[in-house]
Amino acid sequence: MTESPSPLRQTRRSLPIALLRAREVVMGPIREMLAASGVNEQKWRVLRVLQEQGPLELSQVAEAACLLLSSLTRMVRPMEEEGLIARHTPPEDRRKTVIRITEAGEALIHRHAAESAAIFARIEAEFGAARLEALLDLLESLQKIDPRPR
């Protein structure tokens, strides 16, 4: 019995798999950098968002850090206990929780800033600055589409 050709792309040219492979190339050195501090990449993303944007409501942090809100909610208490973030409930809306980066969180980012910049400088040097900017532009455009059936 002969098999009919698959309508699926070869995995080497599959967009989801290609994105995962590229992510691993980029994140491998970042994970190694963070391992020394005992901070995982999800916590790093939360700290970077808060450092960049200031205090935010949990749903805003989750969206900006590419986390599920339920995952972020589970992370808040340990991050607070580690002294990396502080949280409060605004008196005008007791249903919300706002978090902010602490001095210890800022210090952690500062400790890794040079190494993080060096990692991305190596990526930019090897991949090419223009290609990297074009890739970032293309990825931003890709994020705006909705590939679900209409």
Image: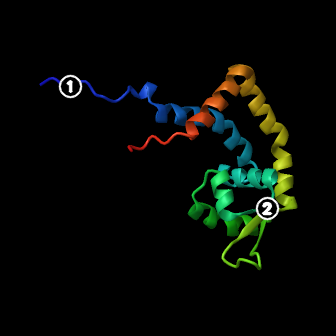
Residue type beneath disc 2: Pro
- In this image, 65 relative to 53: left or right? left
Coloring basis for residues: rainbow
Quadrant, the N terminus: top left
* Residue at image point 86% right, 47% down: 110
Q: Calculate the distance from the C-alpha at mark 1 to the C-alpha at mark 2.
A: 55 Å
Residue identifier under label 2: 55
Residue 27: quadrant of the picture: top right
Image coordinates of residue 101 in percent, x first then y, are 81, 60
Residue type beneath disc 1: Ser
Image coordinates of residue 8 in percent, x first then y, are 34, 30
Q: Secondary structure at mark 1?
A: loop
* Residue at image point 72% right, 64% down: 79
- In this image, 38 relative to 54: left or right? left
Image coordinates of residue 123 in percent, x first then y, are 71, 27
Mark carried by residue 4: 1
Residue 132: quadrant of the picture: top right
Q: Using the image as rendered, state which of residue 43 and residue 89 is in the foreground.
A: 89
Q: Residue furthest left?
A: 1
Q: Are marks 1 and 2 in contact (CB under 8 Å)?
A: no
* Residue at image point 25% right, 24% down: 5
- In this image, 39 relative to 103: left or right? left
Question: In this rendering, which labeled residue sits more in front, label 1 or label 2?
Answer: 2
Q: Secondary structure at mark 2?
A: loop
- In this image, 2 relative to 137: left or right? left
Image coordinates of residue 14 in percent, x first then y, are 44, 30
Q: Using the image as rendered, state which of residue 114 and residue 124 is in the foreground.
A: 124
Compared to 63, does 135 lie above or below? Answer: above
* Neighbours of disc 1 within 10 Å: few (<14), some (14-19), many (20+): few
- The tag earlier along the polypeptide, 1 or 2, is 1
Q: Using the image as rendered, state which of residue 38 and residue 4 is in the foreground.
A: 4
